[in-house]
């Protein structure tokens, strides 16, 4: 533990400027909270905008910067430059798995600090009323989200239906937190798998930027009134939160141990 905390504190001090990035990273997370608090206390104009996931791109940037900047980062940025040269620690008498554990701890601190704040903020205004035109989305929400109910229809035929979700703001915040944990776990697996490969860096960034375009294929589904991938995942998560978190904890433990072992065996 003494070695871990020493390495952890060293990682946090390499480049203090990186600690300003979670602020930009966390701004999209606060959008549902800002909207619900500004209009009648608990209203949001649409499901789809709650689950865009535009902030997930930062996880890959944080991960390559902290876990393996010498392998996956490109030079020339002030933020990343502080992490170059930190591989000198591998020449010291330190426990490599502990070094990787300290790096991973910094990554999760960067990625999860703002989402946790969002979860705590959502507790102040937990319930959510969301408008939705699409019948399939309404039906899926009512079937899978505990406690969700349809509110009485308005007089206007063109107005969307309103769905009331008890503790809906908390559910959305918890889903965002869970998604970021899953992405961080997946990122670790991908980085450690590609690390020893000759073209691992290029393979990572091609795959990474390729995944960014996945939401574009979902636009057609949404335009036809069907639930998006993120909406379906949220509905399933809402109905089985305990199971999702138990499985995630198990996968996290196995992944962390495998990544630490692989990092210790890699030739730097």
Image (tube, grey):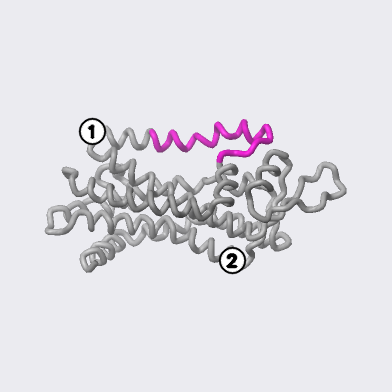
User: In which quadrant is the C terminus drawn?
Assistant: top left
At x 64% / y 65%, what residue is drawn?
125
Q: Does the magenta stretch include residue 226?
A: yes
As drawn, 168 above or below 210: below
Relative horizontal placement of residue 95, taking residue 168 as reference (left or right): left
Give the residue pinned by disc 2: 123
As drawn, 222 above or below 5: above
Relative horizontal placement of residue 56, taking residue 158 as reference (left or right): left
Relative horizontal placement of residue 131, taking residue 62 as reference (left or right): right
Disc 2 to disc 1: CB gap under 8 Å: no
Disc 2/disc 1 C-alpha distance (Å): 48 Å
The prevailing secondary structure element of the residues shown in magenta is: helix
User: Residue 7 is drawn in which quadrant?
Assistant: bottom left
User: In which quadrant is the N terminus drawn?
Assistant: bottom left
Q: Is mark 2 on a helix, strand or loop?
A: loop
Q: What crowding class fits label 1: few (fewer than 14 Cα within 10 Å), some (14-19), or many (20 or more)?
A: few
Tell me residue 190's x, y (percent).
Answer: 33, 41
Give the residue pinned by disc 1: 198
Q: Give the range drawn in magenta.
A: 207-229
Tell me residue 147's x, y (percent).
Answer: 67, 56
Q: Is residue 217 magenta?
A: yes
Relative horizontal placement of residue 148, taking residue 18 as reference (left or right): right
Q: Which of 6 and 98 is in front in this view?
A: 98
At x 60% / y 34%, what residue is drawn?
219
User: Residue 112 is drawn in which quadrant?
Assistant: bottom left
Tell me residue 250's x, y (percent).
Answer: 38, 52
At x 70% / y 50%, what residue is drawn?
45
Numbered label attached to residue 30: none
Q: What element carries label 1?
A: loop
Q: What crowding class fits label 2: few (fewer than 14 Cα within 10 Å), some (14-19), or many (20 or more)?
A: few
């Amino acid at each position: 533990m003494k070695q871990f905390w020493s390495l952890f504190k060293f990682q946090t001090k390499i480049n203090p400027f990186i600690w300003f990035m979670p602020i930009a990273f966390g701004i999209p997370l606060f959008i549902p909270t800002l909207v619900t608090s500004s209009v009648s206390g608990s209203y949001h104009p649409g499901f789809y905008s709650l689950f865009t996931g535009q902030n997930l791109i930062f996880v890959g940037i944080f991960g390559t910067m902290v876990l393996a900047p010498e392998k996956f980062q490109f030079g020339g940025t002030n933020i990343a430059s502080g992490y170059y040269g930190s591989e000198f620690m591998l020449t010291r008498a330190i426990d490599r798995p502990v070094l990787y554990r300290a790096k991973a701890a910094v990554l999760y601190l960067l990625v999860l600090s703002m989402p946790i704040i969002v979860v705590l903020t959502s507790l102040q205004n937990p319930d959510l009323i969301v408008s939705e035109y699409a019948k399939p989305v309404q039906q899926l929400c009512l079937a899978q989200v505990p406690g969700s109910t349809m509110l009485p229809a308005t007089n206007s035929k063109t107005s969307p239906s309103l769905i009331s979700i008890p503790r809906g703001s908390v559910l959305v915040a918890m889903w965002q937190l869970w998604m970021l944990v899953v992405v961080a776990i997946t990122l670790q697996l991908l980085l450690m798998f590609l690390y020893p490969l000759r073209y691992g860096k290029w393979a990572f960034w091609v795959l990474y930027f390729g995944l960014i375009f996945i939401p574009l294929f979902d636009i057609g589904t949404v335009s036809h009134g069907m639930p998006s991938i993120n909406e379906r995942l949220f509905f399933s998560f809402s109905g089985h939160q305990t199971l999702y978190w138990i499985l995630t904890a198990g996968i996290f433990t196995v992944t962390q141990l495998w990544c630490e072992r692989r990092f210790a065996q890699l030739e730097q």
